[in-house]
Each structure stands twice: as C-alpha cells, then as structure tokens.
C-alpha cells in the first residue's frame, strides 16, 4: 500500500481530490441502491467510502436474521 505522501506526489493535489470525491459519490450511490433493495439492509451510512450492509433474504430484518442464523447453525433451517 502506498503512503499518503507518495500518493499525493504521484497524483498531485487536484487529481487526488477528484479521485476522493469520486469514491465518496460512488459510495453514496451504492447506499441508495442498497436501501432500495428489500433483500439488503444498510446498517451504517458514512460520509466517506465505507458502507456496512447485510443480505436479508425475504425482507427479514434485525433480530429475525439472528434467529434464522441460529436455526441454520443448529440444523433446523436450510437456505433455499
């Protein structure tokens, strides 16, 4: 992984700033699509380039997912 100083020297201020802005824009767009899909739950929205989300089959949310995972682990439920 390149150090910030080396990256800044190689890309320059303006190019690095544009790259970071693009990453933040793409992250915001990805959050929009994740929120719009009932099969996913957005757990954390960030102002930078990090999103935390999870797959929620059939619209399950929160504790329901924990219960389903527990049933899978015990062998009482099977994924489709």
Image (cartoon, rainbow, N blue to C red):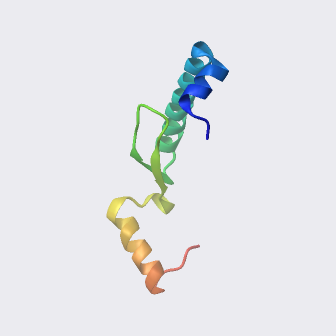
**Residue sitting at the far top:** 14
Q: Position of residue 13 (x, y in %)?
A: 57, 15
Residue 30 versus residue 77 in the image, above or below: above
Residue lying at the far right of the rendered structure: 10
Give me the residue at 49% from left, 36% from top: 49
**Position in image of residue 53 (x %, y %):** 46, 50
Q: What is the quadrant of the N terminus in the image?
A: top right
Of residue 33 and residue 28, the one placed in the foreground of this image is: 28
Q: Residue furthest bottom?
A: 75
Q: Residue at x 48, y 86 (%)?
A: 75
Q: Position of residue 76 (x, y in %)?
A: 46, 85
Residue occupying image coordinates x 54% and y 22%: 21
Between residues 51 and 1, which one lies in front from this camera angle? 1
| Quarter containing the C terminus | bottom right
Q: Position of residue 50 (x, y in %)?
A: 47, 40
For the point 54% across and 32% down, the residue is 29
Say how many tags the image has.
Answer: 0
Q: Nearer the viewer, residue 6 or 34?
A: 6
Which of the 4 quarters of the picture holds residue 59? bottom left
**Front position in the image: 6 or 49:** 6
Asked if residue 21 is positioned above or below residue 58 in the image, the reply reads above
């Amino acid at each position: 992984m390149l150090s910030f100083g080396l990256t800044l020297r190689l890309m320059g201020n303006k190019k690095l700033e544009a790259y970071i802005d693009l990453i933040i824009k793409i992250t915001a767009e990805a959050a929009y699509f994740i929120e719009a899909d009932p099969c996913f739950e957005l757990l954390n929205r960030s102002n930078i380039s990090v999103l935390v989300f999870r797959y929620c089959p059939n619209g399950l949310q929160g504790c329901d997912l924990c219960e389903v995972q527990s049933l899978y682990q015990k062998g009482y439920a099977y994924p489709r």
